Amino acid sequence: MRLTRRRFLKANGAVLTLPLLHSLAGAAETKAAAKPSKKLAIIYIPNGIVRRCFFPGEENAELPGFIGGFEADKTKNERRYKHAPGIYPLELTQTLQPLAEHKGDVTLVTGLDRSYKDGQDVHAQGASCYLTSLSPEQAATKNIRHPNGRTLDQVIGDQVGRSTVFNTLEISCNGFTSGKESIEFDNISWYGPDKMAPSIKEPQKLYDRLFLRDSFRAQVADVTDLVLADANALSKKLGRDDKETMAQFMEMIRDIELRIEKLNKLLADVDIKVPKNEVLPRGDYIKLQADLMLLAFQMGITNVCTFMIGPERWDATLMYEGVFGTPVQHHSMTHNQKGDGYKDLQKIDDFHMRQYAYVLSRMKAIKESDGSSLLDNSIVAYGAGLGDGATHQYYDLPMIVAGKAQGQLKQGRFVKCPSGTLNSNLWLTFAQLMGLEIKQFADSTGVISDLWT
């Protein structure tokens, strides 16, 4: 039998596991296909929401006036909405109406608070600390200025990302190429304090990142061929310990090759429409980025994704097609809710909710290997780091949780958590649902057990 380069390496003992890795990967993939992997998508909306149109029972609440600076904490006791904790039927308020066809697939969660510390802009902290949830005390212990840290998606990706091409995927729908604010306003995913996990804003670049990696493939192939060609000759010159080191290195190179081969196989079975490299009207732009995210889930490229619908604050005009005839500034509108001002602002909330409904519809339509839907195997969160954009409150945050997490999430309900429940408790719940065996995340005090079946 002709000895190929990889067979030759196997025959001569330089990297005994190399040919076997490919076979094991194939068997593992076949076994995994019988039960799809769980997916987590965290969708973030900027600048809070119009509360009276979002939360049941607040329809006649007082309209907020603008409170700026670092005064958000002063509104906590006087503006916090009091409600009786428990589980209630889901009522679709004005802003929730786009979810009518998904009513049995979503749960509204209220009573959630986010950790907050004076000294950083409330919008910047709303985004950058949304998924970190360190308490100010924890941050001080680690000598971190604000409740920053490693975000939930990265912690989960560390554990569940080993079987995918990317541990996590970070997507943004901020189409502006020039920065109007610091990075804290425009990112919710962080490797650690001051270590941003950069999100991809341009559909073409996201497409290239996921699917068009020809130059990278060629480079890795060249390196692999070079290493494989020299491995046998080099191995004869090495001592036992170095041979083991060399074998480990070869396994690492082979793992990269397997990931690239996996991409090629996935691409061969999917018809992908190449997007245009341009800033689209908001709805088209958001849907395009969402479709690319769902392709990444469907093809096994990643199982964890953060999706930022827009940046915090940025006083930039955006075109909400079908809503306003001309571009408007979302952030400035949040500061002018008095009178009828909230009515135009609510149209943006409705617009964002329709994009979320689109994602859920697409996930229902995508079938997995066992016949279940992508949504059946997923957790899809939708929320904000501010409860209201005028008062900049970091409490009573809006949150919707969709998906079944393979039968572990019970849906179609309104879960009222006790006021002051930390949103890190929800993050811990997500982590455990995704398979992590951890008992605490950041400042969490326990899971939200009412979400479990």
Image (cartoon, rainbow, N blue to C red):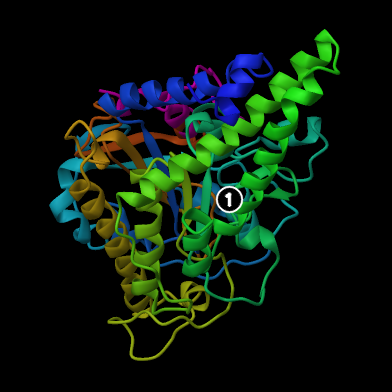
Secondary structure at badge 1 equals helix
Residue 83 in sight from this viewpoint: no
Left or right? Give the position of 220 relative to 306: right
Q: Position of residue 66 (x, y in %)?
A: 54, 70
Left or right? Give the position of 238 relative to 217: right
Farthest bottom residue? 326
Main secondary structure of the magenta stretch: loop
Farthest front residue? 1
Relative height, residue 439 to residue 66 (above, below): above
Left or right? Give the position of 121 relative to 322: right
The residue located at (37%, 27%) in the rendering is 29
The number of discs equals 1
The residue located at (57%, 69%) in the rendering is 313
The residue located at (66%, 40%) in the rendering is 225
Which residue type does callout 1 highlight?
Arg
Relative height, residue 30 to residue 283 (above, below): above
Relative height, residue 287 to residue 166 (above, below): below
Q: Position of residue 295 (x, y in %)?
A: 36, 52
**Residue that carries the numbered disc 1 in the rendered image:** 217
Q: Position of residue 88 (x, y in %)?
A: 21, 36
Q: How would you rate the neighbour count of disc 1 (Cα within 10 Å): few for under 14, some for 14-19, many for 20 or more?
A: some
Residue 208 included in the magenta stretch of the image = no
Q: In this picture, which residue range is highlighted in magenta?
A: 427-453
Farthest left residue? 101
Q: Nearer the viewer, residue 68 or 165?
A: 165
Q: Nearer the viewer, residue 60 or 184?
A: 184
Relative height, residue 96 to residue 299 (above, below): below
Q: Position of residue 287 (x, y in %)?
A: 34, 65
The residue located at (47%, 62%) in the rendering is 207
